Image (tube, coloured by chain):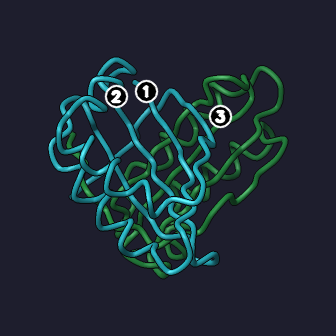
Chain colours: A green, B cyan
Amino acid sequence: MYGLIGKITATSGQRDALIAILVAGSDALPGCYSYIVAADAVDQDIIWVTEVWDSETSHKASLLIASVKQAIMKGRPLIAGMERVATTAPLISHTKY
Amino acid sequence: MYGLIGKITATSGQRDALIAILVAGSDALPGCYSYIVAADAVDQDIIWVTEVWDSETSHKASLLIASVKQAIMKGRPLIAGMERVATTAPLISHTKY
């Protein structure tokens, strides 16, 4: 499996709007086991996105999906910075919802 | 919801053994929506643990569970370092497995 941990800095005051865009754009992602968008509890501008995919190929393919491309375009003006904190090989222990 | 992103440094050559302990200890965690253990793709000693809980209370309570206490005790000698990278408020978009 293929995992990503990303840290996004929203432009000031735009985190909620950006989170909404990220969540909306992640609805149907073939090969995606987990896509979690989370607000940092301390820094009001930081968003964490943690993802688990069946493969890097599926992740790359997702970037060509219309809803994802739309979300990236809509979200870009609200992004002040992006950092890929880690690329990982997940061993999922459990998830339930 | 309550989320954590943690970075664990295993003692040299012990990452796989430590991952096995972490995964085994995370089997039945009331209130835990997601507990993902992942090996860093670049640094051979780094493990990422990303968690989503229904509340901070559930997370704290989990530390009193016998299987978790056992895992912490078993894992401690194999841990060279631990860092809480972020505490978060997750807005889960999706997970499926």
Residue B88: where, in percent of width, then height? 54, 30
Query: In terms of secondary structure, where does tag 3 sit?
Result: helix
Question: Mark 1, chain letter?
Answer: B
Q: Nearer the viewer, residue B47 or A83?
A: B47
Instruction: Identify residue for label 3.
Output: A18
- The amino acid at mark 3 is Leu
- The amino acid at mark 2 is His
Q: Nearer the viewer, mark 1 or mark 3?
A: 1
Instruction: Identify residue for label 2.
Output: B59
| Residue at position x 39%, y 48% in the image | A27
Instruction: Identify residue for label 1.
Output: B2
Q: Nearer the viewer, mark 2 or mark 3?
A: 2
Q: CA–CA distance between discs 1 and 3?
A: 19 Å
Graded by Cα atoms within 10 Å as few (under 14), some (14 to 19) or many (20 or more), the crowding at tag 3 reads: many
Q: Nearer the viewer, mark 1 or mark 2?
A: 2
Same chain letter for marks 1 and 2: yes
Q: Nearer the viewer, residue B2 or A31?
A: B2
Question: Mark 2, chain letter?
Answer: B
> Which image quarter is the C terminus of chain B in?
bottom left
Q: CA–CA distance between discs 2 and 3?
A: 27 Å
**Residue A30 found in image quarter:** bottom left
Residue B31: where, in percent of width, then height? 23, 29
Pointer 1 and pointer 2: residues touching (CB < 8 Å)? yes
Residue A82: where, in percent of width, then height? 76, 51
Query: In terms of secondary structure, where does tag 1 sit?
Result: strand
Q: CA–CA distance between discs 1 and 2?
A: 8 Å
Pointer 2 and pointer 3: residues touching (CB < 8 Å)? no
Query: In terms of secondary structure, where does tag 2 sit?
Result: helix
Same chain letter for marks 2 and 3: no
